[in-house]
Image (cartoon, rainbow, N blue to C red):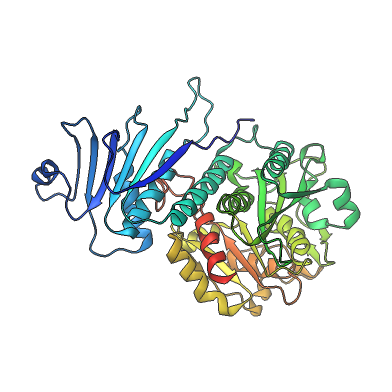
Amino acid sequence: MKKFVYPDIQIATASQVPDGATAVMEWRGQSEHALINDHLAGERRLRSLLPTGQFWSFAKEPTQASVFERLTLARALVTGAIRKDDTELAIVADDADLLDALLSALLANLFVLPDFKQTPETHKAVKLTVVGSLSDKQVKRRLAEAEGNAMVRYLSTLPANELNPWSYRELVEELAETEGWECRVYRYKELEQMGAGAFLAVARGSSKHEASIVRLHYRGNPDSVDTVSMVGKGVTMDTGGYNLKTGGSMFGMNGDMGGSAVVLGNLLAASRRQHKVNLTGWLAITDNHIGPESYHANEWVRALNGTTIEVVDTDAEGRMILADTLTLASREHPLAVIDYATLTGSCVAALSTRYSGVFTNHEPWFLPLIEAGKNSGERIWPFPIDADYDENIKSSVADVQQCNPGKSSDHIDAARFLSRFIEPKVRWVHVDLSSAQHKGGLAHVPTDVTGFGVRLTQSLLNMLF
């Protein structure tokens, strides 16, 4: 499998642009170069090759902008600002918030997604000079978040014959060993013995029963036993099962493991930041295939916590594998459980791919969740999770239906379904990753695969824990 390679980026701060910088990105009221100012002619942006040989990209600073808007403008400034052979770069801004956005956009731009072309992608070492007021701590945080985001995009881009339940588990085990994380793998046979029937219903179709649930632990605060648990959906290829995806809707379903990638990306970012918080990651890794052992509609299964489920649609596999994984995570009674999943099309219909949806059983967190989205530039919006929505998934043969057989608010129904597998008194957040992909990129990220969820979670950890 193609390895994750993050570019070697050496960052230094300075009071002025070094003479050796071959590509410069400047975001100010006016440029330090008269030539740039003379040629703006009323435009807000200009790109020019200066007599010094420096490729200079300039944009006028906005009068007022949100974090998301600053990141989006920064992405536009960075795009095309670096030539193939440029390895010494500089970014310039007088405003610390603009400089922060510019750094974030440049770091996202420097990561090259994996491909399998005859001429492979290249990763070059870069020297970056930050000219302006930005603390070393903030630079370190943005670099850590950028690497975590790159990890999410890398994993979500890998083809299905590269990343499968077996190779994914191996990758996670190797990463855990490298980073010094604790790692525990619950394999198929052990999950059978435990009674994890919801996860195994989907996993039955996985080749040679290679599906597993993996528990990781980053110990950033050894003096505390408290931890925040993160749970991720890791379906490496979703065919829909017997409710087969048709009409091209299967294409791109190698990215249906994006939720589990967000968990890994956050663990990696915390490690790079040396964040003083304990994090436990749970990855529900399988694929959703058709086969003689695969589950189908009108079965019933018993989940790990004893809840019986009437199967309605095999393409609603995400909530099935999350159910038992959420039970395992919440039985440890962490400070909170946060789960991430590319779960429902109805959340995309409600919000588009610009926002992701969020649900929580802890009402005081509604406003902090919105604020964390605003502060990070990864915007989320809360949905209701009231108990009367259970009417939509009432079953006559089991405790609950997997999903509604007709038309319904499936993103809300899915959240109500998942809430049954959280242990009492455990605070829980569910993120439906409707913005895992956005055509043309989102905020500071230039690729369709956005890696959404790392900056959001790092912001949330700072605010609440």
Query: Which residue is nearer to you in this view: 444 or 276?
Result: 276
Query: Which residue is nearer to you in this view: 378 or 62?
Result: 62
Q: Position of residue 325 (x, y in %)?
A: 75, 58
Q: Position of residue 391 (x, y in %)?
A: 68, 75
Q: Say which quadrant the N terminus sits in.
A: top right
Whether residue 363 is visible to the viewer of this picture, yes or no, is: yes
Q: Residue 354's image quarter? A: bottom left
Q: Residue 339's image quarter? A: bottom right
Whether residue 299 is visible to the viewer of this picture, yes or no, is: no
Relative to 421, is 37 on the left or the right? left
Relative to 90, is 121 on the left or the right? right
Relative to 30, is 387 on the left or the right? right
Q: Could you tell me which residue is drawn at 52 percent across and 37 percent down? A: 6
Relative to 175, is 374 on the left or the right? left
Reply above or below: 455 against 251: below
How many numbered circles does the render carry?
A: 0
Q: Could you tell me which residue is drawn at 44 percent across and 56 percent down? A: 138
Q: Which residue lies furthest to the right in this view?
A: 193
Q: Say which quadrant the C terminus sits in.
A: bottom right
Q: Position of residue 347 (x, y in %)?
A: 53, 61
Q: Could you tell me which residue is drawn at 22 percent across and 45 percent down? A: 58
Q: Residue furthest top?
A: 118
Q: Position of residue 185 (x, y in %)?
A: 80, 48
Reply above or below: 108 against 86: below
